Image (cartoon, rainbow, N blue to C red):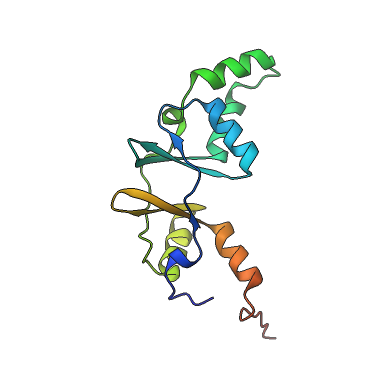
Amino acid sequence: MNLRNSISSIMTKNPICIGLNETLAVADKLFRENKIHHLPVLAEGKLVGLVSKSDFLFFRRGFSNESEKLEDEVRLNNYSAKDIMTKKLAKLDPDDKINVALEVFRENLFHAIPVVENDRIVGILTTFDIISRLAIDEEATATYEE
């Protein structure tokens, strides 16, 4: 993988997103059905936040005391994405280079960075995207010095 390539070459295009006022029940369903870990949050088509599966599980754990399933369902239907989303986000442009994204990941300990063009989300780059690309890259080698 050439680290000077643009991130558009490895990002997940057209990511699954959630609306600002969508309930956490919707987020739960999206996480489970699509096997994803990050949901960009949109308001009027613009990126306003990000809900990670970790944020979601932390929210649920805060209420779990062997609680009844009905109580859990009520909570999931009464809280929305805006209640648990991360608002201050790093963002990348599709033309940014992979090495820039790696630096952002390393410095901030993020696992996902939304890719935005003209205030609209066009993709998401995750550490999983990078690892997946490296795993199939025939030019990637591991050398060990003794």
- For residue 70, say whether it is visible: yes
Q: Quadrant of residue 99?
A: bottom left
Q: Look at 62% across and 18% down and name the residue there.
A: 72
Is 61 placed above or below 40 here? above
Q: Quadrant of residue 27?
A: top right
Q: Look at 48% across and 61% down and name the residue there.
A: 106
Q: Position of residue 144 (x, y in %)?
A: 68, 82
Q: Quadrant of residue 140?
A: bottom right
- For residue 110, say whether it is visible: no
Is 125 placed above or below 17 here? below
In this rendering, position of residue 122 left or right of residue 16: left
Residue closest to the eye, 141 or 109? 141
Is 49 placed above or below 10 here? above
Q: Position of residue 97 (x, y in %)?
A: 40, 69
In this rendering, position of residue 129 left or right of residue 121: right
Q: Position of residue 56 (x, y in %)?
A: 55, 33
Image quadrant containing the N terminus:
bottom right
Q: Look at 37% across and 39% down and name the residue there.
A: 87
Image quadrant containing the C terminus:
bottom right
In this rendering, position of residue 91 left or right of residue 12: left
Q: Residue furthest left?
A: 118
Q: Position of residue 137 (x, y in %)?
A: 62, 75
Q: How many discs appear?
A: 0
Q: Look at 59% across and 31% down and name the residue there.
A: 28
In this rendering, position of residue 125 left or right of residue 58: left
